[in-house]
Image: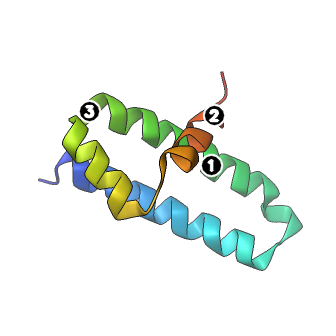
Amino acid sequence: MTNIFETLQTLFLQDLHELHQSQKRRWLILSMTRVVKEEHLGRCCYLAEEFLDPADLHRLKHTLGLDEQRWRAFKARVSG
């Protein structure tokens, strides 16, 4: 069975890849898709903070190449 770290890493990698692809193409119709992906990434950030210990959380951020500023930006995208 896949552990929480691997599951979250997979979710992040898929969403970050799709977000990058949509930004690269600059399709106007994808603006809503971008918002949805960024909100999903924000939710994943909250889940990671809840379920991972600090060392694994740091490792996840490092593996994904996300600094604190970008991490907080994704969290800020989550609708209240």
Q: Residue at x 26, y 53 (%)?
A: 59
Q: CA distance from mark 3 to mark 2?
A: 19 Å
Which of the marked residues, 1 or 2, is nearer the chain's N terminus?
A: 1
Label 1 vs label 2, nearer the camera: 2
Under circle 2, the secondary element is helix
Q: Are marks 1 and 2 in contact (CB under 8 Å)?
A: no
The three-letter code of the residue at mark 2 reads: Ala
The three-letter code of the residue at mark 3 reads: Phe
Q: CA distance from mark 1 to mark 2?
A: 9 Å
Side of 63 relative to 43 (left or right): left
Which of the marked residues, 3 or 2, is nearer the chain's N terminus?
A: 3
Q: Residue furthest bottom?
A: 25
The three-letter code of the residue at mark 1 reads: Glu
Side of 14 relative to 31 (left or right): left
Under circle 1, the secondary element is helix
Residue 13, position as x, y percentages in the image: 43, 64
Label 3 vs label 2, nearer the camera: 2
Q: In the rendering, which numbered label is found on residue 51? A: 3
Position of residue 33 relative to residue 49, above or below, is below
Position of residue 75 relative to residue 59, above or below, is above
Q: Residue furthest right?
A: 28
Res 29 quadrant in image: bottom right
Position of residue 77 relative to residue 37, above or below, is above
Q: Quadrant of the C terminus?
A: top right
Q: Are marks 3 and 2 in contact (CB under 8 Å)?
A: no
Q: Residue at x 53, y 70 (%)?
A: 17
Under circle 3, the secondary element is helix
Q: Which residue is mark 1?
A: 38
Q: Are marks 1 and 3 in contact (CB under 8 Å)?
A: no
Q: Which residue is mark 2?
A: 76
Residue 38, position as x, y percentages in the image: 62, 48
Residue 22, position as x, y percentages in the image: 70, 70
